[in-house]
Image (tube, rainbow, N blue to C red):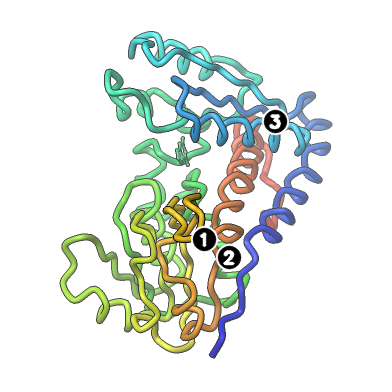
Amino acid sequence: MTAEIIDGKAFAAGLRERVGAAVPAFHKASGRAPGLAVVLVGEDPASQVYVRSKGKATLAAGMQSFEHKLPASVSQDDLIAVVEALNADDMVDGILVQLPLPPQIDEKAVIATIDPMKDVDGFHVVNAGKLAVGEEALVPCTPLGCLMLLKDKLGSLSGLNAVVIGRSNIVGKPMAQLLLQESCTVTVAHSRTKDLPDVVRRADIVVAAVGRPEMVKGDWIKPGATVIDVGINRVPAAEDGKTRLVGDVDYASAAEAASAITPVPGGVGPMTIAVLLRNTLVAAHRRVGLAPPAGL
Ligand code: GUN
């Protein structure tokens, strides 16, 4: 079997269009466009690129974008004061503090300061707790994007065996909660898991989010499984000394066994920003007491 490619780039473009199409009605009802504030601390090049593309996508969807750039030397108190000001600003519906933060800053304390209603990353313990007990929450963008791709490809996920590799708060844990909510039988594997290849071989759905280049091999994949690769790893290219992007899955061999697989790049990656815009639109509606549009 050669797997069908799950085109995350195309799905994300469609989602961004649906979000953008819903903005005028929100504007009419509330008197303003939804607003997303992004806080960037320091000058990490990768973070700067992410923040720039978030700002562009926000404006392209017809939303307001607020960028706050702070020096790497900022104190925790000053950063928290910026977040508190954004909590109090009625034009701001979503707040995203780009991670990682410099070592003098306690990430947990900063995330805990974000108003849970504006926590479009879904990282606040209130949102993590709501997700865990099945209440309406803001859900982390990357795992929600993975779930959208899975449901688009498979329809109902009920009863399927899902293996999530990775147990981070940003991807692995919320991914497991979302799959459980869809009535999958969920296994969360991690660096201490014994016989990982055998665990993965039982999976109808594999979500790889470990950050280890091409770790998941094709002979670990059950024939016909659906594979979602969250990894974005830059590795040296053999030929010319340049680098190339690879996922956590050895794409060439996995595509021989899977029925569908996300490529890297062009799979999960583009979904994260699209879902961030979706979460901002949803947060904006909830904050002003409107029902978010259906089908997002
Ligand atoms: N850094 C890398 N990914 C993310 C993300 O999804 N949200 C935030 N806030 N920072 C990140």
In this rendering, is residue 79 above or below 207? above
Report if the beta carbon of the residue with label 2 is closer than 8 angstroms to ligand 1.
no
Q: Position of residue 210 (x, y in %)?
A: 33, 57
The residue tagged with tag 1: helix, strand or loop?
helix
The residue located at (36%, 24%) in the rendering is 110
Quarter that holds the N terminus? bottom right
Mark 1 vs ligand 1: CB below 8 Å = no
In the rendered structure, which disc, 1 or 3, sits on the residue that comes first in sequence?
Answer: 3
State how far apart marks 1 and 3 are (Cα).
24 Å
Residue 285 is situated, as x and y percent measured from the top left of the image, at 66, 37
> Whole-percent x and y of residue 119?
49, 34
Q: What number of labels is visible?
A: 3
Q: Amino acid at mark 2?
A: Leu
Q: Which mark is residue 146?
A: 1
Per the image, the residue denoted by label 2 is 149
Circles 2, 1 touching at the beta carbon (< 8 Å):
yes
How crowded is the residue under tag 3: few (<14 C-alpha within 10 Å), some, or many (20+)? many
Residue 99 lies in quadrant: top left
Disc 3 target residue: 34
Image height of 259 relative to 77, above or below = below
